Image (cartoon, helix red, strand yellow):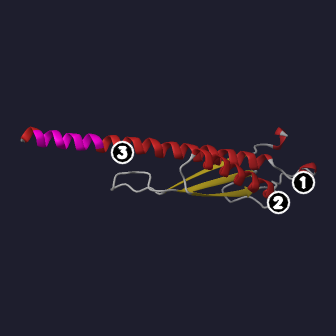
């Protein structure tokens, strides 16, 4: 009987570890996917600049086009490759028109993208609950001599 109890305990511990490992791989996949999406949203929105301001030598991002690009990209990727129910994307622009944050003393034009996803509980184990993932990425345009 002692052998049976020890075997049962080891089997339950092994199945718990296997379940946790499988769920963790799925969670890491979702995090990496959202990080790639956030980086693409930030870099894509940073490439869309106001042409008139650019001709005057100022760096001003085209906010409307940038937000539309980010929404379209997030919808395309998350709807195809993720098991999330809903998502939210927000962009913060720091440029010559809007101004720069206090942490950006060098006045580098920056786009910060934050992508959040809500989903069902990602872990099957009852003592771990994760129902959302949020990732953030920033893209900076360093030096006006680049363009």
Mark 3 Cα shell of 10 Å, populated few (<14), some (14-19), many (≥20): some
Check disc 2 and report its element: helix, strand or loop: loop
Pointers 2 and 1 in contact (CB under 8 A)?
Answer: yes
Mark closer to the chain start, 1 or 3: 3
Quarter of the image where the N terminus is located: top left
Left or right: 67 in relation to 115 = right
Quarter of the image where the C terminus is located: top right
Mark closer to the chain start, 2 or 3: 3
Start and end of the magenta stretch? Answer: 4-15
Say which residue label 2 marks: 97
Say which residue label 3 marks: 20
Q: Nearer the viewer, residue 50 or 120?
A: 120
| Residue at horizontal 74 percent and vertical 46 percent from the top | 44
Question: Would you place residue 100 above or below residue 8 in this image?
Answer: below
Left or right: 36 in relation to 15 = right
Check disc 3 and report its element: helix, strand or loop: helix
User: Which percent across, then down, holds residue 3?
Assistant: 9, 38
Check disc 1 and report its element: helix, strand or loop: helix
Residue 33 is drawn in which quadrant? Answer: top right
| Residue at horizontal 79 percent and vertical 57 percent from the top | 63
| Residue at horizontal 29 percent and vertical 42 percent from the top | 15
Left or right: 58 in relation to 19 = right
Say which residue label 1 marks: 53
User: Which percent across, then down, holds residue 107?
Assistant: 75, 52
Does 5 lie within the magenta span? Answer: yes
| Spatial CA span between label 1 and label 3 | 52 Å
Mark 1 Cα shell of 10 Å, populated few (<14), some (14-19), many (≥20): some
């Amino acid at each position: 009987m002692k052998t049976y109890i020890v075997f049962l305990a080891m089997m339950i511990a092994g199945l718990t570890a296997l379940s946790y490992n499988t769920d963790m791989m799925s969670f890491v996949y979702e995090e990496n996917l959202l990080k790639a999406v956030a980086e693409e949203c930030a870099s894509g929105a940073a490439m869309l600049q106001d042409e008139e301001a650019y001709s005057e030598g100022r760096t001003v991002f085209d906010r409307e086009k940038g937000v539309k690009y980010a929404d379209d990209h997030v919808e395309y990727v998350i709807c195809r490759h993720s098991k999330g129910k809903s998502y939210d994307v927000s962009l913060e622009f720091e440029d010559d028109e809007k101004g720069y944050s206090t942490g950006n003393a060098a006045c580098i034009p920056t786009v910060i993208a934050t992508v959040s996803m809500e989903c069902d509980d990602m872990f099957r184990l009852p003592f771990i609950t994760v129902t959302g993932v949020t990732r953030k990425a920033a893209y900076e345009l360093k030096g006006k001599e680049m363009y």
